[in-house]
């Protein structure tokens, strides 16, 4: 059995910020959010949707907003901890109790709840549809190829199309098509050998 302290993951420094986190909790308790425990730490939900979480890290304790990207952030408090990776999550970091301004914290929380009520979320970005005229032409002439292609999952179809269409020259596109036709007919995905 692991001891409890080893298994806290991102909350492993929670103890060193105990008072500070309790202060944040007491503020959040004034709102309509419900406290749950997810990923080993407190997460506050509204209608079963994650609104915010609390955590203690080595150098700061933090409030994070799951859909923080939609907050107006007039006071410029929020940061994106991992640019390019986290689209929605935003953190508000504190290094002392003195930095916690209840009125400001509540403003942000109420705004986050309001955003949730309005259903503001980032939809997963759909991949652009790629059409390969050259492959379409081949498939029009070769129905076995068309059938075989349609058996692939959309993701694998996409990989073939992307592979063909990212070639700059028509000549290269054609040679890539030559290369993938036997694979398609044998039902081998473009990257199967690497999977």
Image (cartoon, grey):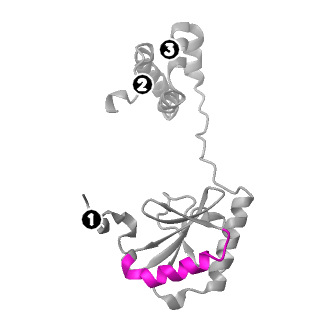
Identify the mark at residue 3; answer none if there is no mark: 1
Q: Which residue is mark 2?
A: 189
Callout 3: SS: helix
Q: Earlier in the sequence, mark 2 or mark 1?
A: 1
Determine the residue located farthest toward the right in the rendered image.
Answer: 118
Quarter of the image that includes the N terminus: bottom left
Instruction: Determine the main secondary structure of the stretch shown in magenta.
Output: helix
- Residue numbers of the magenta segment: 15-32
Numbered label tally = 3
- 102 or 142: nearer the eye? 102
Left or right, residue 168 beside residue 45? left
- Separation (CA) of disc 2 from disc 1: 45 Å
- 29 or 150: nearer the eye? 29
Q: Residue 48 in the image: x percent, y percent? A: 62, 55
Say above or below: 100 vs 116: below
Q: Earlier in the sequence, mark 1 or mark 3?
A: 1
Of circles 1 and 3, the one toward us is 1
Q: Is residue 142 visible?
A: no
Of circles 2 and 1, the one toward us is 1
Q: Which residue is mark 3?
A: 148
């Amino acid at each position: 059995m692991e001891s409890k302290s080893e298994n806290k993951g991102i909350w492993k420094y929670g103890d060193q910020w105990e008072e500070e986190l309790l202060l944040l909790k007491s503020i959040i308790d004034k709102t309509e959010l419900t406290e749950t425990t997810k990923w080993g730490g407190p997460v506050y939900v509204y209608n079963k949707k994650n609104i915010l979480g609390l955590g203690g890290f080595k150098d700061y304790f933090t409030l994070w907003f799951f859909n923080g990207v939609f907050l107006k952030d007039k006071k410029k408090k929020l940061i994106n901890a991992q640019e390019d990776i986290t689209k929605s999550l935003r953190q508000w970091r504190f290094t002392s109790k003195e930095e916690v301004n209840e009125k400001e914290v509540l403003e942000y929380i109420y705004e986050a709840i309001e955003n949730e009520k309005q259903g503001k979320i980032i939809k997963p970005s759909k991949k652009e549809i790629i059409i390969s005229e050259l492959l379409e032409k081949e498939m029009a002439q070769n129905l076995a190829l068309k059938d075989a292609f349609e058996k692939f999952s959309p993701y694998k179809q996409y990989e073939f199309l992307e592979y063909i269409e990212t070639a700059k020259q028509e000549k290269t596109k054609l040679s890539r098509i030559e290369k993938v036709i036997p694979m398609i007919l044998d039902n081998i995905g473009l990257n199967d050998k690497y999977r």
